[in-house]
Image (cartoon, helix red, strand yellow):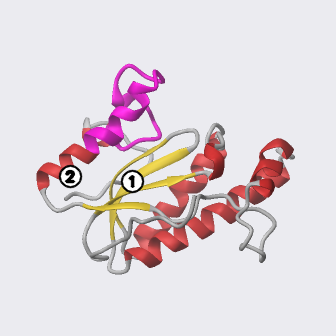
Amino acid sequence: MGRSRYTITEADKPHFMTCTVLEWLPVFTRPDTMQIVLDCWRYQREHAALKLYGYVILENHLHFIAQANDLNKCVHGFKSYTARQILDYLELHHAERLLSRLRFAKRAHKTDREYQFWQEGVHAELIFSEAMMREKLAYIHANPVKRGYVRLPEHWCYSSASHYAGLESLIEIDPW
């Protein structure tokens, strides 16, 4: 698969985005790898003025709705940082099967690295209305239920659904 045809069109407006692990490998099955993602978003909220409106982390991809003055830069930083940290984690924990797949599936033009973690590009859709924001949040939050992981969206702790249900969340969510 080539580079994504989706682009962040208006970088200062909220976008619904999807990031997928190369070959849909199940990397987010360990709390430590999911924590890397949450910590990165927390850092970007504090230091890069990222506004995070919603998210879900599943075993091989994640969805989120975010906005920043330079969203392209934030997403690039997010993917770069999380890839490096997760690859370091996998190496430290001798996850050889995952690492060998990430090495084998790496795009040929990426000669500056041993592994590729994320699929190229990001599926980004501009959120242009309140109705669309509600639709995308509902989609995000329904993912773990559709997969049979939980019965109610707010029961999946790696999601912003608990925040929207008035419960405690693992990471602060910005109001829209």
Number of callouts: 2
**Residue drawn at the location 41% of the way across and 41% of the way down:** 159
Disc 1 target residue: 64
Q: Is residue 148 magenta?
A: yes
Query: Is 59 located above or below residue 10 in the figure?
Result: above
User: Regarding mark 2 in the picture, which secondary structure is present there?
Assistant: helix
Q: Is residue 75 magenta?
A: no
> Foreground: 120 or 15?
120
Disc 2 target residue: 133
- Of labels 1 and 2, earlier in sequence is 1
Dots 1, 2 in contact, CB < 8 A:
no
Label 2 crowd (10 A; few <14 / some 14-19 / many >=20): many
Tell me where residue 33 appears, x and y as whole percent.
64, 48
In the picture, the quarter occupied by the C terminus is: bottom left
In the picture, the quarter occupied by the N terminus is: bottom right
Q: Is residue 56 left or right of residue 113?
A: left
> Foreground: 4 or 163?
4
State the image quarter where residue 5 is shown.
bottom left
Query: Is 129 located above or below residue 149 in the figure?
Result: below
Q: Is residue 138 left or right of residue 73?
A: left
Q: Magenta residues?
A: 137-161
User: Regarding mark 1 in the picture, which secondary structure is present there?
Assistant: strand
